Image: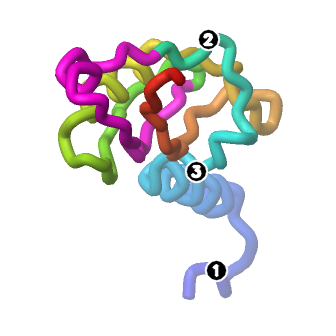
């Protein structure tokens, strides 16, 4: 109804601010891991118990890449065998660094997912 009274610079600024806050509240945008640029590789520490038992497996994780390129908020989504490689995958991913993602000339945080495979060397 107020919009029917005519254009108002304050109203336009308020609407723009509300749109920005809604985007932030939704959290960082999700990007495929393949579209990110790793600056520091994933270095896996194979769990000793898994080595002794000759176990292989995988862990699927979600995580946030900060505007600075650091990995935070690592969360295990699924794994096989369950629980065996989770901690090792989380530690390894926490040490990875990415090139910051730029949007509109500004570095932004993004979320991504990755499946980390644990394979015995042949």
Image quadrant assignment for residue 120: top left
Residue at which label 1 appears: 3
Residue 4 visible at all: yes
In percent of width and height, residue 22 lies at 49, 58
In percent of width and height, residue 59 lies at 37, 42
- The numbered mark at residue 74 is none
- The numbered mark at residue 30 is 3
Image quadrant assignment for residue 63: top left
Inspect the magenta stretch and tell me whether residue 51 lies in it. Answer: yes
Mark 2 vs mark 3: in front:
2
Q: Nearer the viewer, residue 75 or 87?
A: 87
Residues at circles 2 and 3 in contact by the CB criterion of under 8 Å: no
Extent of the magenta region: 44-66
Q: CA distance from mark 2 to mark 3?
A: 20 Å
Image position of 15 with respect to 62: above or below = below
In percent of width and height, residue 119 lies at 46, 31
Image position of 68 with respect to 7: above or below = above
Label 1 crowding class (10 Å Cα cut-off): few <14, some 14-19, many 20+?
A: few
């Amino acid at each position: 109804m107020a919009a029917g009274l005519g254009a108002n610079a304050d109203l336009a600024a308020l609407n723009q601010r509300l749109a920005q806050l809604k985007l932030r509240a939704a959290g960082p945008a999700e990007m495929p891991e393949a579209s990110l640029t790793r600056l520091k590789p994933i270095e896996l520490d194979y769990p000793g118990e898994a080595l002794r038992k000759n176990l292989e497996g995988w862990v699927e994780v979600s995580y946030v890449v900060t505007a600075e390129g650091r990995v935070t908020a690592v969360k295990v989504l699924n794994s096989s065998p369950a629980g065996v490689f989770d901690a090792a995958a989380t530690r390894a991913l926490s040490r990875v660094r990415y090139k910051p993602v730029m949007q509109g000339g500004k570095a932004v945080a993004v979320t991504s997912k990755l499946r980390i495979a644990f394979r015995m060397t042949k």
